[in-house]
Amino acid sequence: MANVLPEARLLRIFACVVRHQGFAPAQQELNLSTSAISTYMSQLEALVGVVLCHRGRGGFALTPKGEEFHQEALRVLAELDGFERYAAGMRGDLRGSLKVGVLDATISDPMLPLPAIVGEFAREHPAVQLHLNVQSPYDLQLSVLGNRLDVAIGAFQLRMNGLVYQPLYREQHWLYCSDAHPLFGDTRIAPEAIGQQRMVSRSYWSQTELARHGFKRSEAAVDSMEGQLILILSGAYIGFLPEHFAKTWVDAGRLRALLPASFGYQAPFSVVLRRGRAKEPLVQKFRDALKRHVASADTDAFMHD
């Protein structure tokens, strides 16, 4: 019987091409010429017996069969990566790659000292290649579920089946306006006046989430804290920011928290894993580093999947 199982290398090239949406964009990551990539892709298609993608003047696109094959290739590659990490861990030789995802604007968070965590992990496991990705809460969870990330850190209001959420700490948020906003110099703001202001929210907030923070609607939406800060600093909007992220601007007299007694909330941060992966050596070592550096982490939760 003819061998129809593609080599892992062909699958990795295919996955990279799909991720970059074309041969030319994938050149740098693969360190291959477009002609070499084309040759490998032709070999893969000949092996599986179907056309996986269209390429040419019309641009890159997966065929319906290619879509199905891509999903299965990602699953197989994730299983292979997990097995390689497991085998390396058995002999005490941690190698391979660890893909970590995190929300944006965490660099200023004293509760999550990522530079120290990453630095410790890199020194203890120099043969491990670390990939750090910044994504929205929804995308972080999808990436962990699809094995595109091994672990993610963030605040997740809506949780997905198949994932394990282990509590870390709570991040304080306040409602801010800038020195360019009419409310900045008002010392006697009525709570009802806040609801009449133009408000910027997160694009991933539901109407229920918006109402929970005291607003019926928003006039703008952003995908990142940096985008939120820009719109607030414009003076056209008010909006919520993490206290640590706003601190520099507050200290400089550019931002002011509005009615902290009435408007504020704490976002519960968690580390997220795909169910069944907690005991993989690299994942476990990274969780150990987190536990050592995040003082309020729930130790019991870290011990169980």
Image (spheres, rainbow, N blue to C red):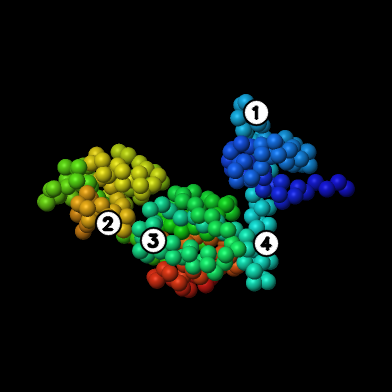
In the image: residue 50, left or right of residue 186: right
Q: Residue at x 62, y 41 (%)?
A: 27
Tag 1's secondary structure? loop
Q: Give how far across and how far down residue 63 sits, in percent.
A: 66, 34
In the image: residue 244, left or right of residue 163: left
**How many angstroms separate mark 2 from mark 1 (CA)?**
50 Å
Q: Which residue is mark 4?
A: 84
Disc number lying in front (4 or 3): 4
Neighbours of disc 1 within 10 Å: few (<14), some (14-19), many (20+): few
Q: Please report whichever mark, 1 or 3, sits nearer to the chain's N-terminal start.
A: 1
Neighbours of disc 4 within 10 Å: few (<14), some (14-19), many (20+): some
Neighbours of disc 3 within 10 Å: few (<14), some (14-19), many (20+): some
Tag 3's secondary structure? strand
Residue most toward the top? 57
Q: Which residue is mark 1?
A: 56
Residue 303 higher or lower than 23, as above or below: below
Q: Amino acid at mark 2?
A: Lys
Q: Which residue is mark 2?
A: 247
Q: Please report whichever mark, 4 or 3, sits nearer to the chain's N-terminal start.
A: 4
